[in-house]
Image: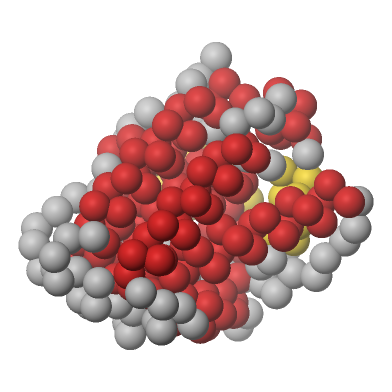
Amino acid sequence: MNAWNPMTYEGKDTILRVVREEADRMFALAEAPGAWEAPTACENWQVRDVIGHLVDTTEGYFKSWDIARSGAGADAFGLAVMHERAGEGGRAFRSLPQAEMMARIRKDLDQMMGILQPLTTDEWTGFMVPHVYMGPVPAFIYPAGQLMDYGVHSWDIRQGSGRAHALSADAADLLVPFMFIIWQSTIKPDADMSPFTIGITVTGRNGGSFRVSVSPEGMTYEPGDVSDLPAVIDFDAGSMVLTAFGRINGGTARGDQAVADRFLNLFYRI
């Protein structure tokens, strides 16, 4: 059993713990003197907009779970529009005072944890919930989404401060398995999908070597030996997460640089 793989029930307590830890760190950052209207790494986003985004997203999750429990369906917008819609949603709360928004995000986090904590083994992997951008997904995608928001956006807030900093290893390790899904879901519509295979290596608790294949049908990946491939990109867990989210250009490419560049430029950034 792997307590660090949140795609399995065995990883449930670990990811919920780390979500709470990352949220507490974000709240402390957002409540620091002078922080509320400070810039972040997200263009045109202030710290207050990050909190607004979390409120907007989390309260949207509540609606998705209500839909799933009712047995109804819902449309998905696709990840290509997420950046624009998320920005609009986050900035929509700018007129509300800091104290009100911080109380609201804490309440939303507690409510979301109240949904996720009681999930059973079968529900964690088998209960399908409509995601506003990705369509029906298993329940474990939702704590992953919370960790992406609290972990990556905390990085954004720290980056905006101009101080040196680093992504939490616990958050990065837990997010690694989801970065392949992010890549699968963010291929540019006009990308050249003529077939090739590249190796990806990642350090950390969910690390390893992965063979990633691109074809007109999309992107697939599987664990495996990468020594026979034309190019390999090596990541630590944090650089993989931040690269997949378009925050940095990370990784170290070995072999055919053109193949590595081709892979890294397949994706639009979210």
Residue at 40 percent of width and 81 percent of height:
94
**Residue sitting nearer the eye, 103 or 132:** 103
Would residue 173 be seen by someone viewing this image from the given angle?
no
Q: Position of residue 259 (x, y in %)?
A: 42, 64
Q: Residue furthest left?
A: 163
Is residue 219 toward the left or the right of residue 202 in the image? Answer: right
Would residue 23 be seen by someone viewing this image from the given angle?
yes
Q: Position of residue 17 (x, y in %)?
A: 42, 32
Name which quarter of the figure residue 124 lies in.
top right
Residue 62 vertical placement versus 225 (above, below)? below
Q: Position of residue 170 (x, y in %)?
A: 33, 35
Residue at 32 percent of width and 69 percent of height:
98
Residue 50 vertical placement versus 221 (above, below)? below
Q: Position of residue 237 (x, y in %)?
A: 33, 43
Is residue 70 toward the left or the right of residue 51 in the image? Answer: right
Picture quarter with the N terminus: top right
Residue at 48 percent of width and 34 percent of height:
16
Residue at 71 percent of width and 25 percent of height:
120
